[in-house]
Each structure stands twice: as C-alpha cells, then as structure tokens.
Amino acid sequence: MALAKRIIPCLDCDKGRVVKGVKFLDIRDAGDPVEISKRYSDAGADEITFLDITASSEGRETTVHTVEAIASQVFIPLTVGGGIRTLDDIRTMLNAGADKVSINTAAVFNPEFVREAAERFGSQCIVVAMDAKKVSVAGEPDRWEIFTHGGRKATGIDAVEWAKRMVNYGAGEILLTSMDRDGTKSGFDLALNKAVSESVSVPIIASGGVGNLQDLVDGVLLGQADAVLAASIFHFGEYSIPQAKRYMADKGITMRL
Amino acid sequence: MNKIAVIDYGMGNLHSVAKAVEYVGENVTVSVTSDARTILQADHVIFPGVGAIRDCMGEIRRLGIDEIVAEVVRNKPLLAVCVGMQALMDSSEENNGVECLGMVSGRVRYFGNAQGSETGVLTDADGKRLKVPHMGWNMVTQTDKHPLWAGIEDNSRFYFVHSYYIELGAQEKASGVTEYGVPFTAALNKGNIFAVQFHPEKSQHSGLQLLRNFLAWDGSV
C-alpha cells in the first residue's frame, strides 16, 4: 500500500525517428517512436520520456506531430525534452499532448525561465534535467558539477545546490543524469543520486549507466530514486519491462504490476 | 451521438483528456470549450484543471464557469479531475487560502502540513520522508459500488500528481481513498458529480475504463 516506484523508458529521437536503435524482434518499424511508445506502455512502462535531439527547426515540427501521435494512443504520462527554451516551446509541447516538459540547458543559461515556466504552467509539468559530473578527487568529500553540451562544458555550478535552487524556482521533478556513468552500463552514480534526493522535496528520476536489473534496484534502494530511467537495456531487448518490474518487486520495491 | 464537453478555462493541457475520451468513446464528439451553450448542450461534461488554484479560480469566475458548472450538475453527469475536483470544494490552503466553489463540502490541504508538523515534511508509517508532490501510481481503495468503478479492480493503481489533497466534509461521500502519509479522498460522488484526484486519462487501462464508465453513466447511482 504505497506509491509505486516508476520505470521510465527513454526514447532519443532525431527528426521524428528513434535513434540509438531499438531491437524488438516483432516490431514493424524499429525507428517509429509511436509504435515503440505503445509497445512500452502495453508492457507496463509507468511513463515515457521522449528526448528530441533534432537540431533543425523543420525537424522540430516533425517532433510536434510525433508527440501528438503518441499522445493520442498512449495513455500514460509523457515527458518531452530537448530544445525547450521558451514558454512558447512549452505551450507547443503541452498542446501537442505532452504532460511534462524537461528543461536542461535553458535552465542553466537562464534559471528564471524555470520560475516563469512553473508559474505559468504549474510545477507538475516542469521537470528540470541536470547533467552532473563528479569533480572532487579521491580523499575529498564528494562534489558534482553541472555540465552542458553533453558533458563537455563545465559550468562551475554545484549539482546539489543547483537541484535545491531549481526546486525553489518551481521544478516539480528532477531528472538527474550522471555524465560519468551515461553509456557505461556500470550502474547509476548512487552517491550523486542520494545526495540530490536527500536535499530536495520533489521526486528524483535517476538516469545514466543502467546495465542490468540490479542497477535499477540499487538506484531506488541505495540512490533513493523515485523513478529510474533507462534506454538501451530495454531498447535492445536485453530485459523487458515486466521482467524489470518483477525483479524490483522481488527485492521489496513497490511497483505497479 | 454522445456529446462530450471538456471545460476549457485556459489552465493547462486539456488535450490528454480529450484524446483519451475520443479513444474510448464510441460515437462521441468531444469539444474542448468555455462556451456556455456548447457545455450545456453536451451529454457529459468533464471539468479538468491543472496548476495553481488561485489562477484556476480566477479564470473560472472570470469566464463564468462557476455558474455553468452549477447548471450542469442539475441535470447531467460531471466528471471533475485533479484541480477540477479541488475547485468544487469550499476552500483550499494553496496560495495562502483560496475560496472555491463550495459545491462539495470540505477543504483542500497541503501534504506538507498533513501530519501537523511545522516543517512541511511528510513521512510514511516507518518515519521515512515522502516526496511532495505526490507523483506517480498509487492504489485507490474503492469505498462504494459507484457505476464509475465498473470493471475496475479494487485497489487498482492510478496516476497522481498533486501537492494538495481533499479533506472531505463529514456529510459527503468518498468513492475512493488513497494513503500518502495520510489517507485522503481520491474519488468522491455527489448526485451527478463524480470527482477524482488522479488522472484517468493518464492511468492506462484502469483510467480508460473509468472514462468509458463515465460516458455510459446517466448520473444516477
């Protein structure tokens, strides 16, 4: 009898197509985000995150149509991120059927944007995505900094302080990605996740580094994540969502089964 | 033809609920509108809401939605969702106290104050801190046999996202309760009104079934 922890598959899309590859044996079109979202929803995903990595503005229009198509067939929460820079961007995505938007770089360059967004649309739909990297050296207390440009540019901003500030500005949820772990399959940065989760009141989505199902369990039990985000372990069919949920439930985590 | 009106008062994303109704409905037309005539001519009316209650109530009063809703519930079924449900109550603690429609007796309280602490911290039975907003899938225990629960298993999980919850007046009837640090009213009914704190349009099978039941409901219990 408790709130369930969430599993959130993440689709990286470029010009309306899922990139990073999805390998379901029986899917007609492995690049179609609508078909893939539907598949994940049917499998019991608790939410879907759609990350738009399209650079061009024509590509963005495609993204809006894709979000509309997903939202008319998938009835679980949908978060859209990537290139959200203005209140108009947010309005466009919400009108297309997104339930939440995730703001990353624009928050770093203009923190007030998060405040304006939360005031205008409500905290419930404002997710702040932060990319953090460990900057402390051995022997020092752990410290992480916010990075932009896919982890290449340091900002000098302390990750824990940043999370607190963003929540103070109205972020309803934090999507926390460890740039040290992203793509490594070596598990979440649990110390980072715990440090951020303990310092703010809102839910934390752990991201970056999932290689197996135990990593998901550790993210919740040790990293104190409220939700876990993963891409490749599901896309490549290594593990299914029901399998992941069952595994987590067997370890004592409350799941929606 | 089943005419559905989703009341639009400019507060957030109403497309999800409209799309979900179109998805489950047979022979339905869905209007997302603030037009009194369209709403009053509909067979079923949905009263959604997201965002801050002060802004919601401001728009509800400015557009005359308060009078329309009062008229609707006299003779047709109304489904209120999330802040739409909260707007029906007497008052809310949000935004330093806001007077609401007073169509259902009770008040809307902040989770952070729910356990009487001054610190704004909510904990579970084991003393572990609970996050606010209450966001995600939680169980709803059905407390009656309302037609809107037809085909939905008791204790099914629905998707919630809210920081404020309803404390129902003693004379009112809860249809479902959920526990998050405190037990709270997740669903209530009163005559032609059925109101839910969760988002049926985002609650997959159980939520779609509830919407299907609403479209088939004539308002009696």
Image (cartoon, helix red, strand yellow):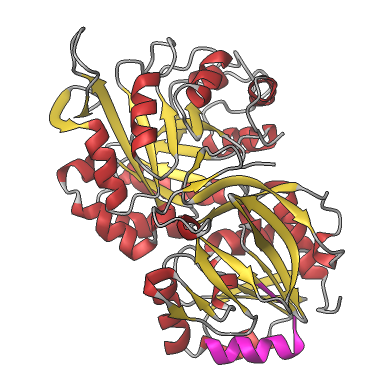
Q: Residue A4: which quarter of the image?
A: top right
The residue at 85%/66% (across/down) is: B147
The residue at 62%/45% (across/down) is: B137
Quadrant where the C terminus of chain B sits is bottom right
Asked if residue A15 shows in the view, the reply is no
Q: Is residue A28 magenta?
A: no
State the image coordinates of residue B138 (x, y, percent, origin top left): 65, 46
| Whether residue A188 is situated above or below residue B66 in the rendered picture | above
- Residue placed most toward the observer, B71 or A236: B71
- Residue placed most toward the observer, A46 or A34: A46
The residue at 81%/61% (across/down) is: B143
State the image coordinates of residue B41 (x, y, percent, origin top left): 68, 88
Q: Is residue B73 magenta?
A: yes
| Whether residue B117 is situated above or below residue B47 in the rendered picture | above
State the image coordinates of residue B141 (x, y, percent, origin top left): 76, 53
Quadrant where the N terminus of chain B sits is bottom right
Q: Which residues are magenta?
A: B66-79
| Apparent side of residue A227 relative to residue A73 in the rendered image (left or right) | left
Q: Residue furthest top?
A: A138
| Apparent side of residue A253 relative to residue A173 in the rendered image (left or right) | right
The residue at 25%/19% (across/down) is: A142
Q: Residue A124: which quarter of the image?
A: bottom left
Q: Residue furthest front?
A: B117
State the image coordinates of residue A206 (x, y, percent, origin top left): 43, 29
| Whether residue B135 is situated above or below residue B175 in the rendered picture | above
- Residue placed most toward the observer, B144 or A234: B144
Asked if residue B186 shows in the view, the reply is yes
Type of secondary structure dominating the magenta stretch: helix
